[in-house]
Amino acid sequence: MSRRGVTVWFTGLSGAGKTTLSCGVAQQLRAWGLPVEVLDGDLVRQHLTKGLGFSKVDREENIRRIGFVAEMLTRHGVIVLVSAISPYRAARQEVRRYIGSFIEVFVDAPLEVCERRDVKGLYRKARAGLIQHFTGIDDPYEPPEQPEVVCKTAEQSIPECIDLVIQSLKSRGYV
């Protein structure tokens, strides 16, 4: 019998903790010998979606492409962990429908916390007008309406948040 794959989609502002959480979940799942792939938004943009900008149309196409890869892996029994800002609710809903086996994780951190965590200085550059279409500054972020998991990374520890995601996977029979 083959195992069921699933896509766990981490969404939230830049600096909210999406990559940290997805990598932590991946580490735990790999320790259990489970097939896991992480599709990190920054890395995907360097390779799979290179050439796309940050307009609404390009961001939606970026999410579609990530969703396409995630669906293929999910279909083959892989636990796919996507960490991407994915600011538009409709685009996330589209990939949810396309993939099917889907858990949305809202990595919820206030903008001011994300700005404090910003080691790359992206928020500072966006506020100075050096970066256009920056989510949370001059581009919107539409929070999920009914995510399966909410991780409040300004209030909860990373291990607590990782455990919430693992428990969600367990309760749905994926691990």
Image (cartoon, rainbow, N blue to C red):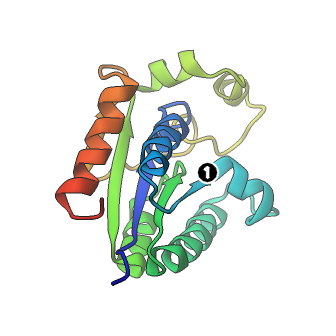
Q: Which of the two residues, 50 or 83, is positioned nearer the viewer here?
A: 83
Task: Identify the residue at image location x=68%, y=30%.
Answer: 126
Residue 146 seen in render: no
Q: In this view, does 28 lie to the left or right of 46?
A: left
Q: In this view, does 17 lie to the left or right of 50?
A: left
Task: Identify the residue at image location x=44%, y=75%.
Answer: 77
Badge 1: how crowded within 10 Å, few (<14), some, or many (20+)? some
Task: Identify the residue at image location x=31%, y=52%.
Answer: 144
Picture quarter with the C terminus = bottom left
Q: Position of residue 33 (x, y in %)?
A: 46, 55
* Residue at the far right in the pictured view: 51
Q: Position of residue 142 (x, y in %)?
A: 39, 50
Asked if 33 appears above or below 121 in the picture, the reply is below
Q: Where is residue 148 in the image (x, y as percent from the top left)?
A: 24, 53
**Disc 1: which residue:** 40
The image quarter in which residue 104 lies: bottom left
The image quarter in which residue 53 lies: bottom right
Asked if 53 appears above or below 105 in the picture, the reply is below
Q: Which of the two residues, 107 or 167, is positioned nearer the viewer here?
A: 167
Q: Position of residue 21 (x, y in %)?
A: 46, 38
Residue 155 seen in render: yes
Asked if 173 appears above or below 162 in the picture, the reply is below
Q: What residue type is labelled 1?
A: Asp
